[in-house]
Image (tube, helix red, strand yellow):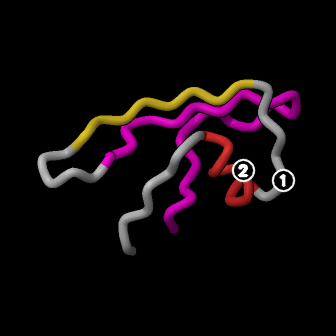
Amino acid sequence: MAHQHIESPEALLPALEGVLPTKVEWSHRQTADGWSETKEITIVSPKSVSPSRPDYGA
């Protein structure tokens, strides 16, 4: 899969199939070659979606 730069957590929403989170937490680090590597994404929603890293890259 090609690298995809994500400007904001909101950019992930289409990949979450319409889930509207009340809180999105994410952390990332800049790799040596300049890519931003996402380390963790936590989503908290009213529907109690499992607050874990979504496998949106699959």
Residue indicated by mark 1: 18
Q: Give neighbour class at mark 2: few <14, some 14-19, many 20+ (Cα, 10 Å).
A: some
Residue indicated by mark 2: 13
- Which one is nearer the viewer's eye here, 6 or 49? 6
Amino acid of disc 2 = Leu
Q: Position of residue 37 (x, y in %)?
A: 32, 46
Quarter of the image with the N terminus in it: bottom left
- Is there CB contact under 8 Å for labels 2 and 1? yes
Q: Is residue 47 left or right of residue 33?
A: right
Q: Identify the disc placed on residue 27.
A: none
Q: Position of residue 47 (x, y in %)?
A: 87, 34
- The residue shown at (64%, 50%) is 11
Q: Residue furthest left?
A: 32
Q: Is residue 4 left or right of residue 51?
A: left
Question: From the viewer's perspective, is residue 11 above or below residue 56?
Answer: above
Q: Is residue 55 left or right of residue 36?
A: right
- The residue shown at (50%, 31%) is 26
Which quadrant holds residue 39? top left
Sequence-first tag of 2 and 1: 2
The magenta stretch spans which residues?
Answer: 36-58
